Structures are given as structure tokens and as C-alpha cells.
Image (spheres, helix red, strand yellow):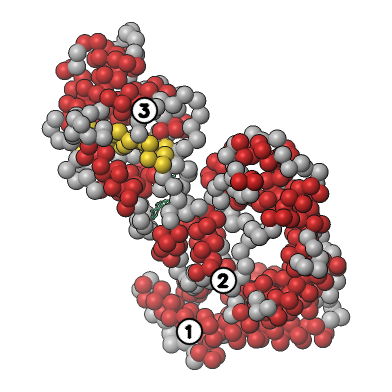
Amino acid sequence: MTEHLPVSVRAPRRVPLVGRHAELRVLAGHVRGAQAQDGPGGAVLLAGEPGIGKTRLLDRLARTCPEHLVVGIAGVRSQARLGFAALHGLLRPFLGGLDTLPPPQREALGAAFGLVSGGTADRYLAGLATLTLLAGAASVRPLLVLVDDVQWLDPESADVLGFVGRCLHGDAVALVLAGRDDRDGPDPFDGIPVLSLTGLPPADARDLLAANSAGRIDPAVAGRIAAETGGNPLALLRLTRTLTAEQLSGGAPLPVALPVPGRLRAHFLRRVRALPADTRTLLLVMAAAAPRESAERWRAAGYLGIAAHAADAATAAGILTREHAAGFQHPVFRSAVYWGAEAADRRLAHAALAAVTDPVRAPDRRAWHRAEAAVGPDAEVAGELEAAARHARADGGPAAEATFLLRAAELSPTDRVPRFLAAAHAHLALGNPASAQAAVDRAETELGPEDALLRARVRQTRTRVDLHRARLTDVLLAERARTELAAAGEQARTPAEPADRALTHREREVARLAAGGVLNADIAGRLFISVSTVEYHLGKVFRKLGVTSRRQLTTVLDAEARLP
Ligand SMILES: Nc1ncnc2c1ncn2[C@@H]1O[C@H](COP(=O)(O)OP(=O)(O)OP(=O)(O)O)[C@@H](O)[C@H]1O
Ligand SMILES: [Mg+2]
């Protein structure tokens, strides 16, 4: 029987547990050892950063101990000031045994839980009472007590549970605590063995990424994600959602530093925020530099007037490695520092890196840093990026080429259309029609009334993109649409032949608005076309997609949005 588990332990999950065999063996050893007088003792503290998988492991442990009665609680931040609240939650199922306790223990627990008036809630006596109650329950059936999020326990409950944990031997009571590894103040769990939970090893991290992703993940991309997250499962899972399918498949480059979930960033930033300003700037320069720019990062710091000894404070705080302060102790520091900084400070770091990067030996990296430092359009930087794109093409780096071109277009003060179109073509060559379409869309918004020739080129490129998308996705779309409609108990009409099924840009615009519930008259107003033109386009959309109602259209477009 499993009882009284913390809500988080019961939360549904989508991804099967990956790895963690060794950790589960250690935990199971402690649980078994609880019954032996000379065993390793019945308490262990699972410690680690946010998202590393502590709760998930507790959950798995509970499932692997069928012979145990499992009880559990979790510390709750908002209840951390309510004395004995957590302990009360834990002992509630056993309070029937209160009368069997020796009077001093009964009174202490009674006072702690407000069950009697007067009396003092002595923590030592409350600890003894807790031990007696748990041992009594375990005499019927071995007991596994799980206490998650100990960092948010009220101090009284934490003291009592620490005391209990140190006393458990041979009582058939196993206590497994779990919490963050940066708890402040005196440690109530001192003396209880700690199992530090670290990131998943690279192979397991890659398995987790693959298990949580609908599309293909490029091995090099998976390797970088595994390395930069330090194998933190929460960060790994989140990145499969925040990065685009193109980034995951290697078709588009990854950001300078991979973003990690807020609670993980906040956890790592706590230590960074306590550092002197120079040290923080130095860390930001290190985070903005590419991994191979080790010489440049020090020169850039010097360029900003930061002395090398600014690194000492970060080394002492365990943020930089001791060996010449060469890198971050934990890879997530890099992301936390980079994305935790103000945008203006990030630009400053990139500007310093650009200033010290050799324009002859590393022109492309310099161009990239200059681009990241730019506040607005800059013809010179745009020109450098275009040159970098040419180099990337010559070196067989199409993804870099596409990215350089797109950024060149964004930073061009004039003549942006041809650059957006060049970026669109590069994305098409890469097999990324969605990015190509986004680039064409941006080209179109840049067109002026006099640009007849450019307008024709935009149209031409869009046709190529549409054809590409039609080939790639419409077969999938039609299949998915049929499945979705069948699931909804509706039948799709036989759609037109594949070659005719691709929606034009305008049809897609109209379809999206109609599916979003916009009325025909409003669609007409928004797109500056007549209502009858809207009706005409919608008629074609319905025929092409084999749908007969707006509701079906919404289903189909939703299905398309979920296509890989
Ligand atoms: N080994 C694993 N295999 C698959 N998924 C995992 C694994 N470990 C953790 N996860 C998933 O990663 C996410 C974060 O894990 P979990 O909530 O256990 O972290 P935590 O250490 O308890 O974090 P916090 O300190 O914030 O409570 C959850 O969605 C969890 O299901
Ligand atoms: Mg947790």
C-alpha cells in the first residue's frame, strides 16, 4: 500500500525513467539496511540542483519497495514558517498511536501539534515520540518514509527529522530525504549520509533527449545539449521544447548559450550575484565567448579594464575551475550568467570580444560578435556577415551560411530584401522550408511600392518555398488530418491530388484567420481584400484540404502545427 505521498511524487510523467541504476541501488541498499542493526543505517539524504531528478528517484524508489508501507511528505515553501507543520503531515496516519506513547513524549507531540493546551513542544521529546510512532508502525510492516524538498521544511520539523534520521538502526524504518544542494544556515541533517545526485551521463542524456523529441536530433547537437546542461534532466526536457525542430536536427545553429529553465538559472545565479561587479563582468565575457576563444576572453576582459585577479572571487565561490580559472565548474553557470545578464551588458561583452578578435585570422567570429553587439542596423557589420556567409558556404557549412545571411539582412540599413531572399534560398537548400518562408515573409514586409522587380523575385522565391513545403508536408498533413478528423468522428472528403493540394501564401493566411474564428468580413478588412475574394480563397482551401467546415479546418491546421 502506498499512502500519503506528496503531490509531486504522484505527478504524471511522459518520459520513461532513463538510467539512474547505480543511484537506485544505493538507495535500495539504505532501505534494506534499515532492518539490520549493523547495516548502513536507515536514513539517506539525496541532494542536488533543481531538476536533477530527486523527486523522480523518490517516486521510482517507492515503486520498487512493494513490501514497504510508503509514507511521504514534501516541504512547502509557503509553510516553512509554520512550526511542526510538515511533521504533523507526516505523522497524521499514525496519530492513533498517540495514547500509547510515554506521557512526556505524548505531551511534547501534543503541544507541537496544538492537540493539548499548555505544555512545551520540546524538539528532542517530539523526536523521540516520532521515532516511537514510526517504529510502532514498522513492527507491523516495514516503513519507507520519503521527505522531499527538505529545503522548505519548517525548522522544527527539519530538526526532528534530522534527529530521527541519525537514530534509525534496526527499526525497519527507512528515511529517504531529498533536497536542493545549496541550503543555507545550520544543517539539521548533519551526520546523515548524503547521496549527491549529479547530471545524467552523456549517453543517458542523449537517450532522454531522443525519448522526448518527435523529430530527429543531430548527434552533435545532442552532444552539445548534454554537455551544456550538465545532463540535468529538467533542462534536457525543456530544451527539446524550446529549441526549434531545425535547431535540434542541426539545420539551424544553436544560440550562443543554451537557455535553461528559470528555476535552474536562479539557483546558479544566486552564487554569481554575490560576487563583485568586475568578477561578474568577467564571467559574462567568458559566457559570451565561444568555447575555443580562451585567449580572447582574457584579452576582452583586459579591454574592459578588468584585471585577471577578478577571477579569484569566482574560483573561491566554486564557479570557475581552479586550473587557471579556465572554465565554469558546472556548465549551467555559462547559460545562467549569459541569459541572466541585462541585454546591454551582453552586447558589451560581445563588443569587447569583437574588439580583441583578429580580423584576419578569425573574421567570421569577429563579425558574429559584432553582430551580437549591434544595437541597430549597421552596414559594415552586415557586409562582414555576408562575407562570413560566403566563407561558410565555401567551407561546407550551410547552416552557418543561412544564419549569417539572415543576421546580415536584419542588420542591413538598406537593401534588405535581397539578403532576406538569399537567406531564404540558403534555408531551402538546407531543407528548412519553415525558416525559408519566414525569411520570405520578412523580405515581403520590406518591399516598397516602387520595387516591382524585387517584388517579382519575392514572389518567385515564395513559389519555390510553397512547392517545397507542399512536397514535404502536405502528404503528412493530409494523413494527419484524416487521422484527426476520424478521431473526432468525422470524415474527410477525398482531397485533391497532392500536386494541387499546396496552399498558396494568401490561401494559408486566409485559412489561419478563418480557423482562428475571424469572420470573413474581418478577414477582408485585415488583408485589404474584398469579402468575395475571402470566400473564393476559403472555397479553394476547403477543397484542397478536403474539409467541409471551419471546425474541420481548425482541426486540420492544429494538426499541421504539430507536424514535426
Ligand atoms: N532519469 C530520468 N529519466 C527521465 N526523466 C527524468 C529523469 N530524472 C528526472 N526526470 C524528469 O525531469 C524533470 C525534473 O525532475 P525532478 O522534478 O525529479 O527534479 P528535482 O531534482 O526534484 O527538482 P527540484 O529540486 O526542482 O524539485 C521531471 O519532469 C522528471 O520526470
Ligand atoms: Mg523535486
Crowdedness near tag 2: few (<14), some (14–19) or many (≥20) residues, C-alpha within 10 Å: some
Q: CA distance from mark 1 to mark 2?
A: 23 Å
Task: Give the mark toward the camera: 1 or 3.
Answer: 3
**Residue 475: mark in rendering:** 1
Image: 230 above or below 403: above
* Residue at horizontal 26 percent and vertical 44 percent from the top: 28
Give the image location of residue 356, x and y in percent.
80, 57
Crowdedness near tag 1: few (<14), some (14–19) or many (≥20) residues, C-alpha within 10 Å: some
Residue located beneath label 2 in the image: 250
Amino acid type assigned to the residue bearing label 3 in the image: Gly
Secondary structure state at the residue bearing disc 3: loop
Image: 537 above or below 551: below
Front position in the image: 185 or 558: 185
Secondary structure state at the residue bearing disc 2: loop
Residue sticking out furthest to the left: 140
Amino acid type assigned to the residue bearing label 2 in the image: Gly
Q: Quadrant of residue 270?
A: top right
Amino acid type assigned to the residue bearing label 1 in the image: Val
Disc on the earlier residue, 2 or 3: 3
Drawn side of residue 435 relative to residue 10, left or right: right
Residue located beneath label 3 in the image: 191
